[in-house]
């Protein structure tokens, strides 16, 4: 993950110490001509009560990002939108950070989709799952 993170530049993908994943984050990287860009979307598969939706949806979350330094904040804002389904997602694009309210949910099955493309970006896809960082920490503890 360190090598992938460094390919985007400082701060473009949050480190596990910076952002504790509370919903799945799907990262899709692809090489392309033109300028580097990132798109953040939210995939909704469950409703506000955790019940499966009949038809999952994908909603763009904000405009296209052209600065690598802006990716981490957008991911944080998307996660807040997912964890607070009673508030319109677009409200989290402008809310002051850190968000001072208690989140409605601790975790969600809904997910963030991060699409990054540009010259020199390797074709790669991966999913960061909630709790994966904590699980690996416990596995390193000796009895």
Image: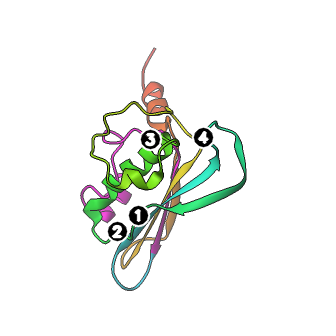
Q: Is disc 2 in contact with disc 1, using a CB cutoff of under 8 Å? A: yes
Q: From the viewer's perspective, is 13 left or right of 124? A: left
Q: Which residues are magenta?
A: 1-30
Upstream in the sequence, badge 4 or badge 2? 4
Q: Is disc 1 in contact with disc 4, using a CB cutoff of under 8 Å? A: no
SS for callout 4: loop
CA gap between label 2 and label 1 equals 8 Å
Residue at numbered disc 2: 65
**Which one is nearer the viewer's eye here, 110 or 29?**
110
- Label 2: how many Cα within 10 Å (few below 14, some 14–19, many 20+): some
- In the rendered image, the vertical position of residue 98 relative to residue 88, given as above or below: above
CA gap between label 3 and label 1 equals 20 Å
Q: Nearer the viewer, mark 2 or mark 1?
A: 1
- Label 3: how many Cα within 10 Å (few below 14, some 14–19, many 20+): many
Q: Position of residue 84 (x, y in %)?
A: 48, 40
Verify whether residue 47 appears in magenta. no
SS for callout 3: loop
Upstream in the sequence, badge 1 or badge 4? 4
Upstream in the sequence, badge 4 or badge 3? 3
CA gap between label 4 and label 2 equals 28 Å
Mark seen at residue 48: 4
**Quarter of the image where one finds residue 72:** bottom left
Upstream in the sequence, badge 3 or badge 1? 3
**Which one is nearer the viewer's eye here, 137 or 130?**
130
SS for callout 1: loop
Q: Nearer the viewer, mark 3 or mark 1?
A: 1
């Amino acid at each position: 993950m360190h090598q992938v993170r460094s390919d985007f530049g400082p701060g473009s993908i949050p480190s596990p110490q910076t952002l504790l994943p509370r919903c799945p984050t799907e990262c899709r990287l692809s090489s392309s001509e033109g300028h580097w860009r990132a798109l953040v979307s939210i995939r909704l598969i469950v409703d506000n009560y955790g019940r499966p939706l009949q038809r999952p949806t994908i909603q763009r979350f904000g405009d296209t990002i052209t600065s690598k330094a802006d990716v981490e904040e957008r991911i944080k804002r998307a996660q807040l939108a997912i964890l607070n389904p009673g508030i319109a997602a677009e409200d989290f694009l402008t809310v002051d950070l850190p968000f001072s309210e208690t989140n409605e949910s601790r975790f969600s099955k809904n997910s963030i989709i991060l699409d990054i493309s540009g010259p020199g970006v390797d074709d790669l896809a991966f999913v960061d799952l909630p709790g994966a960082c904590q699980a690996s920490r416990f596995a390193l503890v000796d009895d």
